Image (spheres, rainbow, N blue to C red):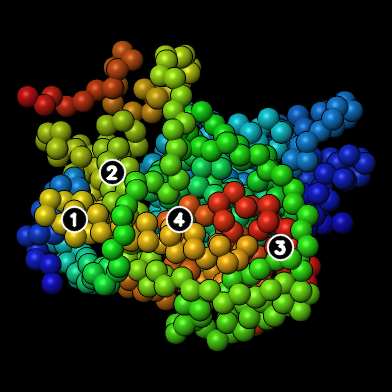
Amino acid sequence: MDLTTLTIRQCHEGLKKGDFTSVDLTKAYLENIKKLDKEINAFISVDEQGALAQAAQADKKVSSGADIGVLCGIPCAIKDAIMVDGLKCTAASKILENYVAPYDATVIQKLKKEVAVILGKVNLDEFAMGASGENSAFGATKNPCDKTRVAGGSSSGSGAAVASNMACFTLGSDTGGSIRMPASNCGVTGLKPTYGVVSRYGLIPFASSLDQIGPIAKSVEDVKIVFEVISGRDQMDATSQNYEFKEKKLDIKELKIGVPKEYFYKGLDKGVEKIIKDKIEKIEKVGAKIVPISLSSVEFALACYYIIAPAEASANLARFDGIKYGLSVEGKDLLDVYLKSKGKGFGAEVKRRIMIGTYVLSSGYYDAYYKKAQCVRELIKQDFAKAFTKCDLIFCPVSPIPAVKIGEKTTDPLSMYLMDIYTVSVNLAGLPAISVPAGKIDKLPVGLQIIGNHFEENTILSVAEFIEKN
Amino acid sequence: MISKEEVEKIAKLSRLELSEKEVEKMQKDLSEILNYFDVLKSAPKVKTTNHSLQTTNLRIDEAKDSKVADKLINASPDKKDGYIKVKAIF
């Protein structure tokens, strides 16, 4: 039996029955990483020793007969922007190449409490800025379904590691689509939770009003299991919300599915459109009511996002000054150290976003760009609020096209930004959304995006389970 | 097209040292991106609030030993006697 193809639930049952141990599981995953990752490049670092020690710990707990949680002994991998005490945390940037995390992120504390096994840290676009994974200072992650193509970003390693059985599940983070995009491209399931439902403490920030940590896994049930463990109020994150996951059994016949006409306009690949429309038809056939809705603000969403996110990033990334952590380049005075350390440490896309952010916040441009974008953000929120008076969930694509060829869009930043057209609004409005595999164009997976109202993760997950089975 | 001088000014505000080539590329990229932002001019007007979800979940501000102080100091490139060393600013 290939242990690495099992879901979390199947691993859990096997561990309890004594069919295999967590050390067996962990070794099988480490073996896969050794075999496959030279080519895929999903991992930035692998913690073989730590993983095996944690697995032995889990096995001890299992054999003691103690009541174990579902994640006990399950091997996972963590996006390298989330801190794991004692392990390097690079954010895929040269500026943090040798930075060792001084403490555990809250989500990591929660996983460790369950005795989950952390195999290592996975690749991303530098500081989570990108839609393809190609902006990593340590090289692009390849798509396991077609190695000439990108895995999707920014949680590229999180998507590819699950898709190629190099981790049973992973954690990613999503600021404008960074969990959903790689999940869609790699044919796995990824959930971007409601803003504030999962603590951001210990996540290297990109845009603090948009960032959210979430799980990527092989099945909807697995995503649900991980989400239940990592969610909940945390006093170390002031934006964290009181939330407790409650399972929801629902009757598809009572469900109203909104389909926004603006999401099926020009620019959407015909193959993607067909796959998404087939799924809408399927759920209609079993009795769900399909409601045409309008989200006219989508036309402004990308511009709004690419002002607000870089503005916040330019402030957040000011901390990497060559003094407190990371790379420091010698200079003649303090200012020179700043200029040289940042100039050398940051990659092209990070520099571009810091520049955009500084520009839109600078005197004379603040009102025209940043303030305007905040008004449009409100408009987008209102648009969704109106939509959710007419429907329970929204069905739409994750990305207008399947995974692109490596290098296809790297020279033209704006064309890369356009890939985020269907995902950024969700972050601007703080909503939860999932990408669930819906079909394939040749060998390239396509994800269906299901968007819910705030705190409706359970409704999203229930319907995603239906989509997965049908 | 945004000027070379303007790019250099923004780079300085951002504390980024850019090469000649980077400045040139940045001129082109920023111009294209800023032009794209013009779409917002046609957006209808609404009143704003500041956050995607309002929250007042602030914890009490009290000192606690988090046991990470040494690790934080150690992470800095230049340190002495438990302090982070910075170049003289005067």
Mark 1 residue crowding within 10 angstroms, few (<14) / some (14–19) / many (20+): some
Which residue is at 13% across, 72% downward?
Answer: B1
Horizontal side, residue A21 vs residue A372: left or right: right
Q: CA distance from mark 4 to mark 2?
A: 21 Å
Residue A254 position in % (x across, y down): 74, 66
Quick check: marks 1 and 3 in contact, CB under 8 Å?
Answer: no
Callouts 3 and 4 on one subunit: yes
N-terminal-most mark, 2 or 3: 2
Residue A463: which numbered mark, if any?
A: 3
Q: Which residue is mark 1?
A: A367
N-terminal-most mark, 1 or 3: 1
N-terminal-most mark, 2 or 1: 2
Disc 2 is attached to a residue of which chain?
A: A
N-terminal-most mark, 3 or 4: 4
Q: Which residue is mark 2?
A: A315
- Three-letter amino acid code of the residue under disc 3: Val
- Three-letter amino acid code of the residue under disc 1: Asp
Horizontal side, residue A465 vs residue B2: left or right: right
Mark 4 residue crowding within 10 angstroms, few (<14) / some (14–19) / many (20+): many
- Three-letter amino acid code of the residue under disc 4: Ala
Q: Nearer the viewer, residue A17 or A166?
A: A17
Q: CA distance from mark 2 to mark 1?
A: 18 Å
Q: CA distance from mark 3 to mark 4?
A: 21 Å
Residue A50 position in % (x across, y down): 64, 34
Callouts 4 and 1 on one subunit: yes
Residue B41: which numbered mark, if any?
A: none
Q: CA distance from mark 1 to mark 3?
A: 42 Å
Q: Give the mark toward the camera: 4 or 2.
A: 4
N-terminal-most mark, 4 or 1: 1
Quick check: marks 4 and 2 in contact, CB under 8 Å?
Answer: no
